[in-house]
Image (tube, rainbow, N blue to C red):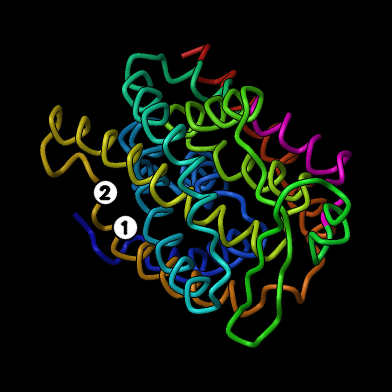
Amino acid sequence: MDFGLYWFMLPVSMLVATIAMLSGIGGAALFTPIFIIIFPLLGPQYLLESTVAAIGTALLTETFGFSSGFIGYYRKRIVDFALAFKFSRVSVPVAILGALVAPMMAEAFLVAGYSLLIFILAGVLIFFHHGAVENGAELVGQRSGALHRKADNKGREYVYKRPKLGLSSSLITSTGAFLTGLLSVGIGEVIVPQLTKRGVPVAVAAATSVAVVIVTVASASFTLIGQLMREGGLSAVPWNLVCYTIPGVIIGGQIGPRLQGLVSQHVMERAIGGLFILISFAMVFVAAQKFEA
């Protein structure tokens, strides 16, 4: 195992983690296409063992990146733990189920499903602005029910009403969690819109989403990595890759929270949506090749 092979993934991972922290999306949404699309272009020595290995590695890397980002948000004191728990108790078991199903599916279908999912997410990010406000009191101040107040470490106060996790939210969260375990994308992309649409301030929504993503992605990644190791032993995990991606996302996870608020959430969502469209078309090409093989 050549431990100098993937050295370039250290700065790449830092960038991916920073973007993930700023936008609230899962870093695996960018790592998976890097592993599946970019690595084969670099040469056969860069190929991972399988699509499931790529998804598992992306999720494992994301776990460490979001854990680092969580520390940054925790220091800012803007994570709503009660709200995070409501979503996590739904997302964790469903994500594990998705991870158990992933190895049973043909690689071509996994890549095709990823392509379709990314394309849908791109449309949501580009065309549906969630109308989030900096202080939820502007949106929910006239509603009945108690408002929750949270002050960050700089004394800025956020006022909002904690949304209830009803049937529709549970279904949306379950779908995102299952797709996360199956395709590495989904949970981060469905949490932030649900929160901001219901008046939770952007900063609090992003921080709370990170907390939900950590436990959900960790559950899915450990399930997938466990299955890979059970079938192929320790060598089934690309340790020469994660030795660069994990430190990279830990560093990027600290950078992202520090930059929170410097880039408009709407601008960030549209930029990532455009990138997702490009990734979707590239994934279609990869899926076609796998169907022909």
Q: Quadrant of residue 173?
A: top right
Q: Quadrant of residue 116?
A: top right
Q: Is residue 123 magenta?
A: yes
Q: Amino acid at mark 2?
A: Pro
- When the figure is inspected, residue 75 is found, relative to residue 218, above or below; the finding is below
Q: Quadrant of the N terminus?
A: bottom left
Q: Amino acid at mark 1?
A: Val
Q: Nearer the viewer, residue 293 or 251?
A: 251
Image point 46% across, 60% down: which residue? 66
Q: Nearer the viewer, residue 109 or 171?
A: 171
Q: Residues within 10 Å of mark 1 (few under 14, many from 20)?
A: many
Q: Position of residue 149 (x, y in %)?
A: 66, 67
Image point 59% across, 18% down: which residue? 288
Image point 84% across, 47% down: which residue? 143
Q: Residue at label 2?
A: 238
Q: Is residue 199 magenta?
A: no
Q: Residues within 10 Å of mark 2 (few under 14, many from 20)?
A: some
Image point 84% across, 60% down: which residue? 133
Circle 2: element type: loop
Q: Position of residue 123 (x, y in %)?
A: 81, 34
CA distance for labels 2 and 1: 7 Å
Query: Taken as a whole, is the magenta stretch helix, strand or loop?
Result: helix
Which segment is the magenta one?
A: 116-132
